[in-house]
Image: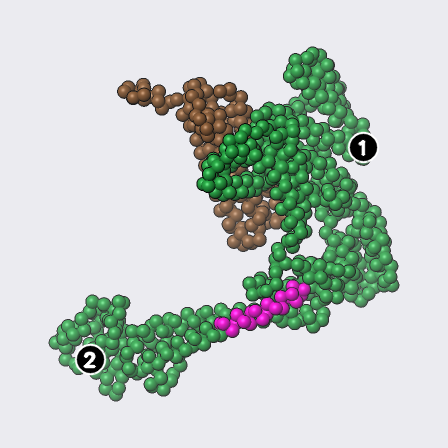
Amino acid sequence: MEITTFSQFFATIFTGYNLAMFGAFIAAAFAGWGSAKGVGMVGQAASGLLAEDPTQFGKTLILQALPGTQGIYGLITAFLIMAKAGTLGTPLDLTLAQGGYLFIAALPIALVGYFSAIHQAKVSCTGVSLIAKQKNEVGKAITSAALVETYAIFALLVSLLMISFLKV
Amino acid sequence: MSISRMMKLSLVSTDSGADDIIQKLTWLRCAHITRTDADYENPDISADAENRRLIYERDAAALNTALMGLRNYREDKTGLFGRPIKATRADLSVEGEKYKSAVGYSADYAALRAREAEITAERTRLRQQIESLKPWENFDVPLDLRGTALTELNLGVLPPSADIDVISAEIASEIDSEFALIPVSREPGGVYVSLITMKDGGLAVADELTRRGFARLEFTSLLSEVGAGDGASNLPSLISVRAKASLDALDDEEESLSDKFKALAAHCREMELAYDAAMTRAAECASEKLVLKTEKTTIVTAWVPYLAVPMVKSALDSDPAVWYTLSDPDEGDNVPVKLLNQPAVKPFESVVGLYSLPAYGSFDPTLIMSIFFFVIFGFMLGDVMYGLVLSVGCLLMLKLLNLSAGVKSLVKLFAICGVSSIICGVLFGSYFGDLPQQLMKNMFGVEIGATYLWFDMIEEPILFLIAAMAIGVLHLFTGMGIKIYMSAKEGRLLEGILDVVPWYIFFVGLGLLGGASALGISSTPGKAVSIAGVVLLILTQGRGEKNPVMKILKGIMSLYDTVSYISDLLSYSRIMALGLASAVIAQVVNLFGTMGGNTVVGWLMFLLIIPLGHIVNLVINLLGTFVHDSRLQYIEFFGKFYQDGGTPFAPAAPVTKYTEITE
């Protein structure tokens, strides 16, 4: 189709398929962004402890990895949207409503993933200071940080269910 | 599956020193020595014990430094791949010559390291010397020559752009005094010159030169370093030659140091033994601070597990200078907690320990928890091949590596849980995710059906969610059941039943309602049971109040707890989320790995992407699975009944970082 008017241009860009892809992007980007920030924060806090006591690396590594999971959840959501839209095989001709639906399905993990990763990172950072003072309390530090993740998991669940319920 | 019964050992010894009896208890390895009188500490004894402890700790620290530093010089295997030294009690003694010589080796090591640092400093100094003399190599005057009777000699540097002839001519025209400005060398940093002036009137020449950028160079510190020789020996070229010779000598010495380190490294085994001996002795001194002591008698208090009592008795009965009693704990004693479990369940104690041990006299949840931990692990990471890799990998680690006790127990835990992954993998048809299907389809164009026994979790996420919730209901109900058991143990069986059973009835009713609406059958039984549950809750949950109105009000209020039970239950949806997460990532890895088709490039991609992708997926999800599986135990399960706060049972024992006691 040759593009001659603005509305044609608009119609080429705003297809259901592209909306779905935008959703995949939002899910991977925001959740990944939050995780990157979070893992970075804990990494900095951990280096402070490791400078004093390098033997604590294993424990701080677990705390550092915790805020990284939101990015994985975002990735999973993005892949499932792509699988639904046929990106990995033949792209499907989704209606605008279907594309919009997939876009909305990406929002829970995108938003909750971003914010929960950063909040989880804050708890993990304090967990690092906890280990600095009490070497054997790593279990408690990890559990506290894992509590924050619950909400990212719920958001992932909502995103996954929404995607899997769409009939295309 | 229980908390070990502890006996309090109160002991009086009339042996001269406290260390004999402490050593005896240490080598029994089953007595948790505790402060005899919580409020009283004999300052003299404690200071004496502390001093001795510090000495041994210093020995141990020196030995440790030497062992760490010599690691790269050793020829035998160390660390994870090393094997512990077989030793007896006599080997771990700090008395004999062996110990002394080992500590001596560590001192030798420290001396060698100090010499090594000196060599480095010396070398830097010599290099600087050579560097600073480079421009003067062709200057045939000793550096300490300051002039003759009438003339003065100065050395210095002019800016790189300076032209000596022009400057000499300019100054000669301005000042009426003889002088000579002789270029020595031209370097990128400037023109190095020697300046000979008359003693009278030389100052003016120097001033004029300074105005043109001349900077005088003094070699006083260099000369003081090389020492005052006779005239000719201070020629710059000779000083350089001597410095170079010293550098060569230093290089030789450093090489010989490396041989000396190698020679010391041959004694590492002795140092390892001495390290354990020193640490054991330090620990004994620390224990000594806990006892009460006069000149002739020592009073020790310790906790001994009931099963170890015969061993302690036989060891102490033979000692004529010891009197003791063994009794059950008194009210208010802080009794240490030791869990007793079968070998297959024991690794799960580390999961409990990461949270907090149960209080003494409460309930050891390890056995029941281990069953749920095992099942939930499989649901979260259900893949036959992942399970195989995990179990086999962990078994190999146990066989080949020298792991510390804590790590060993975790590795055992994962080896056991890998079996759960295998079982669940068969149920859900997951072998490296859907690798068989994708491989056959993308590489060979053959469609093969799903391989599951139960259902495909990605195709039927709702069924998976229901399964996860069902595990959750079982888990929570079990936790509540344990609460009844614990109440019964405290003689409050009725209380326990009234606390828990109405909730059982209520939730079973809700379950029936949900099931009826899903299957489209009559909801009457569900309604009846739920309502019965609600009525029972209202009638029972306010029983603590005296006022009948408050009784009912509190009963109604308790219905609000439904919210917390529901949130507990929803928490189990993470089983599904994590299970899907590992499965979906595995699928994506398989897709990329088989995308190239049945071609050379395709197979190269396959060999590269499939192993790497699955290892990354396994590691990431292993962490998530362990953390969230533990969390479900700690928050949802333990929250229903657990009394935490037990002090871990830590018997006085020899330190065996490098050794294995064979007695």
Colour in which chain A is drawn = brown
Percent x, y of residue A33:
45, 36
User: In screen coordinates, is B566 left or right of A70?
Assistant: right
Check the image and report above or below for B408 versus B587: below
Percent x, y of residue B308:
81, 51
Tell me whether circle 1 and circle 2 mark residues in contact (CB < 8 Å).
Answer: no
Q: Main secondary structure of the magenta part?
A: helix
Which label's residue is closer to the chain start, 1 or 2?
2
- The chain drawn in green is B
**Residue B273 lies within the magenta run:** yes
The quarter in which the C terminus of chain B is drawn is bottom right
Which mark, residue B488? 1
Span highlighted in magenta in the image: B254-274
Can residue B476 be seen from the camera position used here?
no
**Camera-nearest residue between B117 and B7:** B117
Asked whether the residues under marks 1 and 2 belong to the same chain, the reply is yes
The chain identifier of the residue carrying mark 2 reads B
Q: Which residue is mark 2?
A: B180
Check the image and report above or below for B558 versus B357: above
**Camera-nearest residue between B559 and B640:** B640
